[in-house]
Image (cartoon, helix red, strand yellow):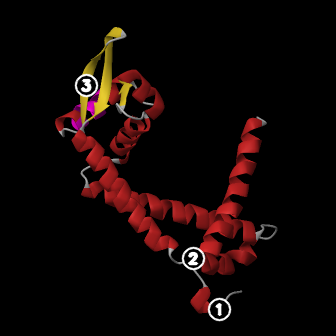
Amino acid sequence: MKQAEEQDHVDRFLEEFAPEMPGVDLEVEGIVDRIHGLNRRFHRMLDETLADFDLTNGEWKLLNHLRQAGPSYRRSAAQLAERAELSSGAMTNRLDKLEEAGLVRRLPDPADRRGVQVELTDAGQKAWEESVSAQAAKEALIAAALDQDEKQELNALLRRLMREFERREQDR
């Protein structure tokens, strides 16, 4: 096994429980456990960043969906609910909070008298940009543990794993 100073908690776990897991590929377990652990930590870091901007993850994603709409930064409430996989009632609650904070505004939908368009305000644009920048800076600090070649290599390896999942999902 690795030297103690190079070990992480996954190495220690696998070393301790290896005798209890005959037939389990410990390299695969290490990969999966590390990906899960990194995922949890990145999510926690994002939640902390968003809390600094008084946003939840769901609210931030809604701002992101509006931002992705391109100039005008506007989508229908129904489109937003569909993208967020929310009921219309849950979307209404989310929009109420964001509108109260001045981050979005609701406008009548010119194509549907019963519909509503949701638009990112200047304050919403600023909150989105600043939160993205703050999170990117935190992520860059973590990624600084790798040099540029290692980042490219890790991306290539993770891409191969992702493509394998995508292929298998298509085959279902």
In percent of width and height, residue 142 lies at: 47, 72
> What separation in Å lies between label 3 and label 2 (alpha carbons)?
44 Å
Residue depicted at x 39% and y 66% = 137
In the image, the segment drawn in magenta is 92-98
Residue 97 highlighted magenta (yes or no): yes
Q: Which residue is mark 3?
A: 106
Task: Please tell me how many numbered marks the rendered image carries.
Answer: 3
Residue 161 highlighted magenta (yes or no): no
SS state under label 3: strand
- Looking at the picture, tell me which residue is in the foreground, 145 or 169: 145
Q: Residues within 10 Å of mark 1 (few under 14, many from 20)?
A: few
Q: Amino acid at mark 3?
A: Arg
Q: Amino acid at mark 1?
A: Gln
Residue depicted at x 68% and y 56% = 159
Tell me: residue 75, above or below residue 10.
above
Drawn side of residue 128 relative to residue 161, left or right: left
Tell me: residue 105, above or below residue 151.
above
The disc, 3 or 1, on the residue closer to the chain's N-terminal end is 1
Residue depicted at x 26% and y 58% = 52
Q: Amino acid at mark 2?
A: Leu
In percent of width and height, residue 140 lies at: 46, 69
Q: Could you tell me if the residues under marks 3 and 2 are in contact, i.e. CB atoms within 8 Å?
A: no
In percent of width and height, residue 145 lies at: 53, 78
> What separation in Å lies between label 3 and label 1 (alpha carbons)?
58 Å
Residue 146 got which mark?
Answer: 2
Which image quadrant for residue 124? top left
